[in-house]
Image (spheres, rainbow, N blue to C red):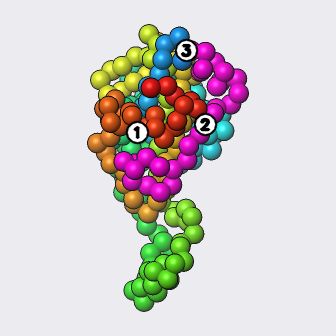
Amino acid sequence: QLKFMHTPHQFLLLSSPPAKESNFRAAKKLFGSTFAFHGSHIENWHSILRNGLVVASNTRLQLHGAMYGSGIYLSPMSSISFGYSGMNKKQKVSAKDEPASSSKSSSASQSQKKGQQSQFLQSRNLKCIALCEVITSPDLHKHGEIWVVPNTDHVCTRFFFVYEDGQVGDANINTQEGGIHKEILRVIGNQTATG
C-alpha cells in the first residue's frame, strides 16, 4: 500500500506483457527509470491493463489533444492525472445510486460496524489512475509537469489505483520528491525498480 494515494484499492503490477517487459528492462539498463502518473477514464483501463499503454496520438483511440506531440502522456503530479481520470468532474447520481431512506443508510452503517464489509467496487462512480515506471532516455520529453513518451516500450504500468463513490486522492503527490520516490521503491522492492 502506498499510503499517500488514500485508497485501499491498490494493485501492484510486477510485469507487463512479456515482449514489452523485456524491451523495457533492456532500455532501463541503458537509461534508468523514474515514476509518473497516467490518468484515463474507467472504460479504457481493461485494455490498458491487458495490453499496456500505447501511443494513441493521431489514431481513433486518441481522447485528448496532443499538444506536445505524439506519445504517451504522463505527469509526475497526481493532480494532472486525476484530471484525465475524470476525478475532478461531477458525476450525475441516478436514483438507483441514492440511498432510499435514512433508515436504510443507518442500517448499512450498523452492519459495517458489526464487522461486515460492503462489497468490493460496487459503485457506479469509479475513477482510476496508474503509477507508471518510465525510462529516462533522451526520448522522454518533459514540458513542465507534462511528460510525453513517444516509445510505447518505455512505459510500464506498475500500480493501479481505484477510487469509488467520490473518494479522492491527494492531488499534491509529486513522484520526483525524494520521500515519495523512496516509498514507491520500497513497496515495489527490487523486483522491478532500482534505487
Could you tell me which secondary element the residue under label 3 belongs to?
A: helix
* Quadrant position of the C terminus in the picture: top left
Residue extent of the magenta highlight? 1-27
- Please name whichever residue, 158 or 148, is drawn nearer the observer in this view of the structure: 158
Q: Which residue is mark 1?
A: 183
Tell me which residue sits at (59%, 39%) in the image.
13
- Please name whichever residue, 56 or 82, is drawn nearer the observer in this view of the structure: 82
Tell me which residue sits at (39%, 59%) in the image.
167
Q: Earlier in the sequence, mark 1 or mark 2?
A: 2
Q: How packed is label 2: few (under 14 Cα within 10 Å), some, or many (20 or more)?
A: some
Is 100 situated above or below 64?
below
Measure how far apart labels 1 and 2 are at the Cα level. Answer: 16 Å
Q: Residue 94 has which mark? A: none
Q: Which residue is mark 2?
A: 14
Tell me which residue sits at (42%, 31%) in the image.
36
Say whether marks 1 and 3 touch (CB < 8 Å).
Answer: no
Measure how far apart labels 1 and 3 are at the Cα level. Answer: 22 Å
Say whether marks 3 and 2 touch (CB < 8 Å).
Answer: no
Measure how far apart labels 3 and 2 are at the Cα level. Answer: 17 Å
